[in-house]
Image: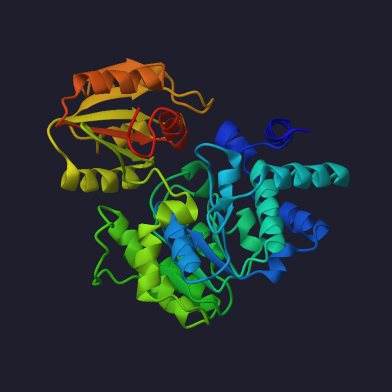
Amino acid sequence: MTYDETIDWLFQQFPAYHIQGVSAYKPSLDNIKALSAAFGNPERSLRFVHIAGTNGKGSVSNMLASMLTQSGERTGLFTSPHIHDFTERIRVNGETVSEEFVIEFCRQVRKLKLDLEPSFFEITWLMALCRFREQQCTVVVAETGLGGRLDATNIIMPVVSVITNISLDHTNILGNTRPLIAAEKAGIIKPGIPVVLGETDPETFPVFESFASQNHSTICQADSAISYPKEIIGYQKENFATVARTLDILNNSGFRISPENVQRGIQNLRANTGFMGRMEIVGQHPLIIIDCAHNVAGIEKTLAGIRELIRGKLHIVYGTSSDKNLEDIATVLPAEATYYFTTFTNPRSAGSGQLNAVFANRFPESAFFTNAVEAFDSAKQASGENDTILIFGSFFLIHEFYDLISPAGQK
């Protein structure tokens, strides 16, 4: 099969959460353990940094991978979802997995004639492990897909576990309180392995403390009393503080990540990891910012960062998945902005009727679109060169805008 045929087969053969939602979730490690055994347990020959959390795990993963790459490590990076192409999920020193590897790996999976029903994420994670083993990675930074305890990535034994923060998201799967969600994320804590907490608060800390005590693991809290590179703005300061504490543990575990490696890792973040879509400025006149915030806590942090940068009038292009709590999201959106609510092509998109029902009365200066391109064009036409356009929401919405805007911000 060609690469395109192979990707179509992947999506059709295995249920994918980013397309089907909760029905694709496999709450067990049995599948991935069986699959990994069939491929010689590639995770056993690799060293890992394991990262979970409601928000920020993508930013933390990419920063750490970039800094490790700058320090001379052969660094694997596993993240999800992708923005442009499937291969973005699996990188080694910034280079995406080759189409040839994807084709060959899927050919081997087909030969197995599986007597189990894995998910798309489980197959993708196994592919990543095999790629990292083949490429002889000296360290792998792995981001969980959903939760932690029963996430497919949780078959690894890391050098350090990282939990960025806890807020209400995916409550139909992980639980409807922060302590319940914290317990799922805490499932990545392993016996004797230190865990870094990017956030500490009275509601969730006892959960982590209990898990760490049971596993004889040391809790290391992020320290915000540090100096930040000038490139770190908005909510990325919290993520950088988490990264800095994780680097302390890595440097005490045989790695050599110098302050120069840290600075170059930030400066070369896009080249080393393909990182995009988090407080990313993609245009100047008007100021255009793209962000993937998709739940209440993430949106609040994004908006706080925008207040540091905003110029002129604020125009917001927003689209989200249908399973998000739009009523809660509406309460944190700024009343003074002009809104362009839109659907996007992914089948999980919230529809125009759903968006209109929640937002129309709350935000009189709003328009509704069934096409993200039209929403963006309308925002640009209404904006002056000294205004600000914020595009945020689902990763799938952001995907559609990267087809319009180059990294230099030119349409």
Can residue 53 be spotted in the picture?
A: no
Q: Residue 36 in the image: state x and y as whole percent.
A: 76, 58
Q: How is the image coloured?
A: rainbow
Instruction: Give left or right: position of 63 versus 173.
Output: left
Q: Residue 187 in the image: state x and y as whole percent.
A: 55, 63
Query: Residue at 75% across / 41% down in the picture?
Result: 103
Instruction: Give left or right: position of 398 versus 118.
Output: left
Of 14 and 98, nearer the camera is 98
Q: Quadrant of the N terminus?
A: top right
Query: Hey, which quadrant is residue 347 in on the image?
Result: top right
Q: Residue 302 in the image: state x and y as whole percent.
A: 28, 45
Of 360 and 164, nearer the camera is 164
Query: Residue at 49% across / 74% down in the picture?
Result: 212
Can residue 175 be spotted in the picture?
A: yes
Please, which residue is most extreme toward the left here?
312
Query: Hey, which quadrant is residue 238 in on the image?
Result: bottom left
104 w.r.t. 130: above or below: above
Instruction: Give left or right: position of 352 versus 302.
Output: right
Instruction: Give left or right: position of 54 versus 15.
Output: left
275 w.r.t. 224: above or below: above
Query: Hey, which quadrant is residue 231 in on the image?
Result: bottom left
Query: Residue at 63% across / 38% down in the picture?
Result: 24
